[in-house]
Amino acid sequence: MKKSNVLVTASGGIVSQGIIKCLKLANKQKKSDVNYKIFATDASAKAPGLYRADEGILVPPVTAPNYLDFITKTCIEKKIMAIFIGSDEELLPLTRARQEIESKTGAVVLSNPVDVVSKAGDKWKTYEFLRENGLPCAESSLPYDKDVFIKEQGFPIVVKPREGHGSLHFYIVHNARELDNAENAIRNAGWRPLLQEYIKGDDSEFTTGITIGYDGKVMSSISMKKTLKGGQTYRAFIDNFKNIRRSAEQVAVKIKAIGAINIQAKTVNEKPKIFEINARFSATSPLRAVAGINEPDIVFRNIVLGENIKIKEYKKLVCMRYWNEVYVPYTTYKKVEHRKKVEHSDAFIPEYF
């Protein structure tokens, strides 16, 4: 087995915890000759991923001037082969610094090209890309043109930040007063508002994960119909959903993704309308991995090891999420705060019967 040291950032978040689960599953299944040693980073000792990895390391916040230097130093010291980015806040800074990090450390930053991350990270740029390429999308507008948009769409409409993620400052408004309040709330949070077509139906939302190889070809795609709670998927039906998958694959190839990307869509008259693109690993990656599409493992083996991968089949499953806990002895937690790292973690997850 090849020992592969990898770094997973922002290990307090749901995306990074999902990546760690996927890498651990790959080690357990032993479907390839790769064995991952997982180093997890976070700015807080309260991040559960620090205690679930092989080693946890406290780092400065991404806004700190020494953040990139710290990541670079860590990659050199730990002989890291690849970096998995676990948060939206770190995605663009680490992607922009890819060339510098890779030249200094040899660690591959597993991220899409900068222009893909930039387009996906701005929902207005996403809409412009989809519209210009004749791809199915939810109609959108900027505030300066809202009178025309409201006349065409009518209420209710969706108001959300161009730069946001999850359900933070997501509003469904029913009149002009609610629209003004939503816009002001988004601006007060330091973001820019976007108006978007409201698509009815809580049971018509899909997320599709696609991995694109270094040759620009689709390695895998998997779709699930999902139910949200608090902005996150808490129930999902994994099935073939052929039309949804093909539409998402078309978008991923057209935008020239490399690595992992996921496409959010709702159906109208059984046809998909895309409303968001996330140019990163998804919080639902572990659900996909259990179904047979382990995206972090696929991307690592293709981008870092140069393997040609093509996976066409996966299991049809119903996924129901529930809360679980990681317990950390208080003395361990205090040591992490002081020493800034976790080695030989004695954190545990009880077995319930």
Image (spheres, rainbow, N blue to C red):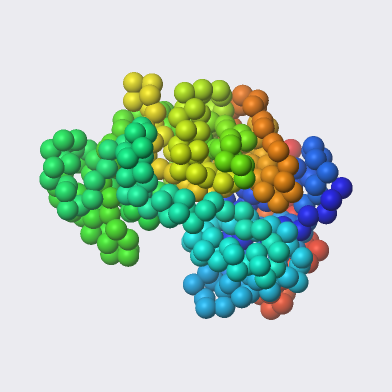
Between 126 and 115, the residue placed more toward the observer is: 115
Q: Position of residue 23 (x, y in %)?
A: 71, 47
Number of dots carrying numbers:
0
Residue 69, can we see it? yes
In the figure, is residue 277 to the left or right of 192? Answer: right
User: Depth check: 136 or 164 in front?
Assistant: 136
Q: Please tell me which residue is depicted at 28% across the width and 50% down the height of the picture.
A: 194
Locate residue 173: give its quadrant: top left
Is 105 drawn above or below residue 176 in the view shown? Answer: below
Residue at horizontal 47%, vertical 33%? 250
Q: In the rendered view of the protein, which quadrant contains the C terminus?
A: top right
Above or below 248: residue 147: below
Residue drawn 20% across and 52% down?
A: 143
The location of residue 313, given as percent across then percent down, is 65, 25
Q: Residue furthest right?
A: 1
Of residues 79 and 60, which is closer to you in this image?
Answer: 79
The answer to whether residue 39 is visible is no
Name the spot of residue 74 as percent of width and height, x first.
70, 70
Left or right of 131: which side holds 110? Answer: right
**Relative horizontal placement of residue 347, taking residue 244 as reference (left or right):** right
Q: Quadrant of residue 54?
A: bottom right
Q: Residue furthest front?
A: 215
Q: In the image, is 324 to the left or to the right of 209?
A: right
Percent x, y of residue 69: 61, 75
